[in-house]
Image (tube, coloured by chain):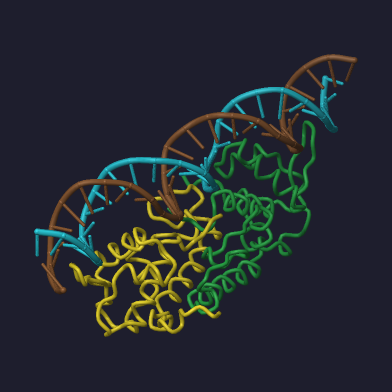
Chain colours: A green, B yellow, C brown, D cyan
Amino acid sequence: MNTFIKREYDYAIRICAYLAGHFQKGHIPISQIATNLYLTRPFTTKIVYQLKKAGIVDTVQGKVGGVFLIHPPQEISVYTVLKAMGFSATINECLQKNTDCPLASICRIQHFFAQQQNLLIENFKTKKISEFALNDTDLIPVS
Amino acid sequence: MNTFIKREYDYAIRICAYLAGHFQKGHIPISQIATNLYLTRPFTTKIVYQLKKAGIVDTVQGKVGGVFLIHPPQEISVYTVLKAMGFSATINECLQKNTDCPLASICRIQHFFAQQQNLLIENFKTKKISEFALNDTDLIPVS
DNA sequence: AGTAGAATATACCTGTTAGGTATAGTTATA
DNA sequence: TATAACTATACCTAACAGGTATATTCTACT
């Protein structure tokens, strides 16, 4: 399988969506996030760590520690989160810098894919995390 | 790196673009295609073989054999070629069938990515190989 | 002050796959 | 009948996705 959005990236967005649903309600322990989003704790930890390094979330250490969004969710785009997670995917390898293809100057294929890629990225920038916000009541399984 | 369009897929489009530039001018030997597109012969062979199985090109065997497009290039879309090469990429794994995510019913993230994916595929279907046609004169290196 | 429960940081593992190469066979023209 | 082409499949290998493990540090609560 060839996915454009890695699992990690998707989980990162989910985690932010969960935190968006709890914005300004204090900090949320990683264990709670992991449980409610059906992720393992170590993996959730890893992602939170990256989101913190990127300045998207901050954490409180110690016994009643946890995670929270630094900025309002309506100011955080999908693109911001993807970039934070190291997203550098190009739709086609030709579009990377330093790729010196001998056909480059005449290649209309490359140009087409570049257009498509820019379109996608624009949409990722427009979409804000607030639109995905998850509340705990959303997460209660229907029985 | 995480590319959506594999090298193979890209090469397949290039090969079709080259054949489009030589449409109705007889069949082109694989060795000529490989040389002019800066690909190795075995790899070109492999791709041509797949394109043949998918009914996009046909081949003539024997000493003066070669490859040619079965249909006019303006009837072949980028999507057709991608599908022929086994393209089944989903922008996000959640969008595959048989993925039963416990969040699925409430996940707006999934819905967003699905929209983006459909957009992209629509554009792949609209774009025709004829728009990429490569002539040999295009390929003469500037000295 | 000590301890429990939380986050931090990094090291490691492992199956899959992208991106090829190799090789043996078949066909058909010269 | 030799040779230059295509056919078909088997195999290789480095990279990486998708995690797990482990040791450490921090802080609320007792």
- Residue at coordinates 27% horizontally, 85% vertically from top-left? B24
Q: Total of numbered circles in the picture?
A: 0
State left or right for residue B15 relative to residue C7: left
- Residue at coordinates 74% horizontally, 47% vertically from top-left? A52
Image position, residue A16 (x, y; %): 66, 53
Q: In the picture, which quadrant includes the N terminus of chain B?
A: bottom right
Of B113 and B7, the residue lying toward us: B7
Q: In the picture, which quadrant includes the C terminus of chain B?
A: bottom right
State left or right for residue C21 relative to residue A87: left
Of D8 and A90, the residue lying toward us: D8
Image position, residue A34 (x, y; %): 61, 40
Q: Is residue B84 above or below residue A21?
A: below
Of D1 and A134, the residue lying toward us: D1
Q: Is residue A103 above or below residue A88?
A: below
Of A102 and B6, the residue lying toward us: A102
Image position, residue B102 (x, y; %): 48, 47
Image position, residue A98 (x, y; %): 62, 64
Q: Is residue B67 above or below residue A15?
A: below
